[in-house]
Amino acid sequence: MLLFSIPTVSAANILIMGDSISAGYGLELDHGWVALLQKKMTEMGYDHTLVNASISGETSGGGIMRIKREIETHQPIAVIIELGANDGLRGASPKAIESNLSKMIDQAGKAGAEVMLLGIRIPPNYGKRYTDAFYNVYSRLAKTHKVSFVPFLLDGIGGNKALMQPDGLHPNADAQPKMRDAIWEILEPILSRSSKAM
């Protein structure tokens, strides 16, 4: 788990529950989208702290096991959920993934935190039927729970060799600003609302 700054009483924490994409796999610590987003938030005058509780290899099941403790520890005003890709790469049931993510959203909501869900796609190894069922989980969750939503975090990045690491699964440093910008567009209204409430 990476903490980009030490949470303080005066700062509003935003908890990130993700996998290697958010943990910055294969990147220098300050090159990942989380670090870039923290910098942008500060530059824009927001007194919020990103708490990056992302772990490479994490699954939605692992997220369920950790989220309650992370919320109790950091008392976030918002939770960004970026999980499910590792489940999909293992061929897990989309229904099980949806159930896990739904429970995570509920946990955050019960704690009074707003939720942002980051959608993801997986390579077509398992065929169109499975990959479509997997991808549709995110939009259905966003609609059901009425949460902020980035439909596809790697839009314009996935499949582009110039923006991916050699493994073809993880975005490289050049892709990180694009991911930051996609998240910022949806996150900024949340920051604005929370600032007014502070």
Image (cartoon, helix red, strand yellow):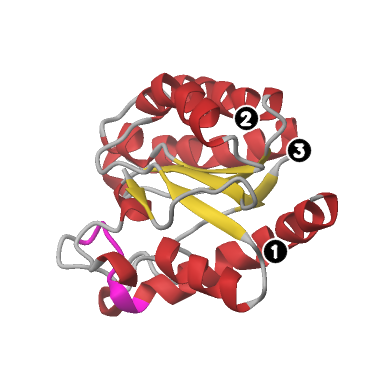
Q: Nearer the viewer, residue 71 or 164?
A: 71
- The amino acid pointed to by label 1 is Glu
- The amino acid pointed to by label 2 is Ala
Q: Nearer the viewer, mark 3 or mark 2?
A: 2
Can residue 31 be seen? yes
Q: Nearer the viewer, residue 11 or 65?
A: 11
The residues bearing labels 3 and 2 have C-alpha atoms spaced at a distance of: 13 Å
Marker disc for residue 179: none
| Residue 152 to residue 101: above or below | below
N-terminal of the pair, mark 1 or mark 2, is 2
Q: Nearer the viewer, residue 133 or 115?
A: 115
Marker disc for residue 146: 3
**Where does the magenta region start and end?**
168-174
The residue wearing badge 2 is 108
The residue wearing badge 1 is 188
Q: Is residue 173 magenta?
A: yes
N-terminal of the pair, mark 1 or mark 3, is 3
Identify which residue is drawn at 49% across, 30% down.
73
- The amino acid pointed to by label 3 is Lys
The residues bearing labels 1 and 2 have C-alpha atoms spaced at a distance of: 19 Å
In what element is the residue under mark 2? helix
